[in-house]
Image (tube, rainbow, N blue to C red):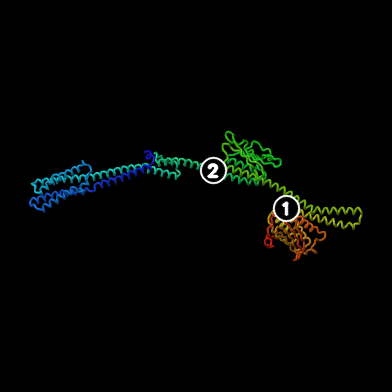
Amino acid sequence: MKLLQRSLVARISASLLAISAMALVSIAVTVSVAGSSQGDATAINVAGSLRMNTYQLVAALQRYDRTPGPEQRAEVEAIADRFAERLQSPGLTDTLPGADDHELQVQYRRLTTQWQEQLAPRVADALDGTSVAIAPLNRALEELVGEIDHLVTLLEQNSEAKIRLLSALQILFLVLTAVVVAIALYDIRYNLVAPLHQLVVLAREAGRRNFGYRTRLSGSDELALLGRTLDTMAGELGASYAELEERVSQKKQELARSNEAMQILHDGSRALYGGGNDLCASAAPMLRRLESLLDIGPIGLSLHDPYDQREVSILATHSRTRPAYCRNHECHACLIDPQPLELSENGESECLLLPVSIGETLLGTLEVWYPAAAPLTHSTKRLLYTLSDQLATAVYLQRRIEEEQQVTLMNERTIIARELHDSLAQSLSYLKMQVARLERMQDREMPRETQAPVFDELRTGLDSAYRQLRELLTTFRLRLDGPGLHSALRQTTLEFSERLGFPVELFFDVPPHLLNPNEEIHVLQVVREALANVHKHARAHWAAVTVRFAEARLRVMIEDDGIGLEDDGSPPMHYGLVIMRDRAETLGGEFEVRNRDAGGTLVAIEFTPQTARLIVQQPAEPAISHQPANRDTAG
């Protein structure tokens, strides 16, 4: 019973089993009643034939009484035997109930006794000629007919009783089946259809993201349990969905805040990389905007001093006092808000210490304070790490720029010193020796004719020194329209085009940033010295400067169509060629000066740049055209 109360499936199964059982019982009863009714018609027919035989026996006796004879006697005997045989036939006896006290059994025994004990002997006596009155015998036979009619009536009533019993049982089973079906339909209607409808409504509402609908099913069957489970699930889904919506909303806010913070970092990067070493003016506004956006602060920046290994406070937002190493007392970036930022109601706060480093080089530290009640999210920490990396990059680049400026200044001073030493210093040394020689001649009071060559050499040396000084001044005063050797050579060719009166062609095919400043100065000086020689001695009408880089070698050629050299060598006392050869040796290259096949002079130097020495040489590529990539014509 408890199982039927707890299980809808059990109840439906029990209803189906009950209906099936009643159908089987009804079929069995029908088969049984139908089986017990077999032979009733035969018995009724046999009983009816007994009545007909009685009438035949009465008629035969009457004929025998009018005209006795063997044929009439035989007819009477045959009818009597047939009556006795039918009275004992199985078609009649087998249909009688087995109970001895049954009315049919009593009536059959009465009929049999009356025939065997009364009528059969009297019929035999009448045939034997014994004095038996026919009329009384006929009346006895008619009484026998009445008994037979009563037996037939009882047989019919017995058969009708079976039919009525079968009908009653069919009606009973039909009523019971209808009751079971009604109960099952009621159970299905209220415990299956209605709960399923509510579950469908719950599923539809859940599909519409309405998790407030509840089935509120009562009971202990499967659907009630499923409904309560789905109600609980809907409540949990509603809570989870609300939580997810809240989290999505928070993520959206964090994303919007992160995007705004990234925009602040992007805008601040321009100020950082363009503001020099003034971090107060470039970084303080960005840090304050981040504080306001991320609800953090104050933020302090300290830089690491690599010389005495200490941390120097450079910048602090919301500071009460000016940093100890502040360099600009007119700047108030740290003192905009004289009161420190209130972190929380109870004053509790935590500090996130971030390294400001490039690789393994520690440049400083970034202190970020925030309320303890509102820990930093993962996205906020990532933004702060990005901020520290950005500050590290800005500080590192600024330091590198300062170092490069110092190195560039020292290289420039070294180049100037070398140029003065290689040109003007040597000329002055030579003049000093000539002056000393002239003093000794004057001390010895030598004739003026002997001193005249010394005066000529002094005059020639002074002219050479003055010319070299002008060349150096001209070189160091060059106004470059753009960085690099190409711009300097273009200006040089323009300058000598004006001097020579015809355009000086320039062919330049060199990768950018190939030469260091020292190499560029030497190449420029060689070109200027060679063009100066063209202007002074060549009497040319065409000149060209070619600078090409191929197979890790730089080749510089200065050509003209002038009168050329007498013997492809350096003329006596021609210091220009000597200086150019010295510059080529300084560059670790080769110097060449010779006459051109087409006429004129060719001056060339070829060397391997310092940067090219760091390149691993690859197998030689196929020969390329000697036509330069860039061609400039001065004039």
Residue 481 in view, yes or no: no
**In the picture, residue 143 is in which quadrant?**
top left
The label on residue 253 is 2
The label on residue 344 is none
Relative to the observer, which residue lies in front, 591 or 59?
59
Q: Earlier in the sequence, mark 2 or mark 1?
A: 2
Relative to the observer, which residue lies in front, 23 or 315?
23
Residue found 50% across the figure and 42% down from its top = 244
Q: Answer with left or right where residue 390 lies relative to residue 609.
A: left
Report the quarter where the C terminus lies. Answer: bottom right
Where residue 120 sits in the image (x, y, percent)? 13, 47
Indicate whether 410 appears above or below 344: below
- Kindly identify the amino acid type of the residue bearing the numbered disc 2: Gln
View extreme (top): residue: 346
Mark pair 2, 1: CA separation: 53 Å
- Kindly identify the amino acid type of the residue bearing the numbered disc 1: Pro
Where residue 478 sits in the image (x, y, percent)? 73, 54
> Which residue is denoted by mark 1 in the rendering?
517
- Identify the secondary structure beneath mark 2: helix
Relative to the observer, which residue lies in front, 336 or 253?
253
Residue 28 in view, yes or no: yes
Where residue 157 sits in the image (x, y, percent)? 20, 44
Report the quarter where the N terminus lies. Answer: top left
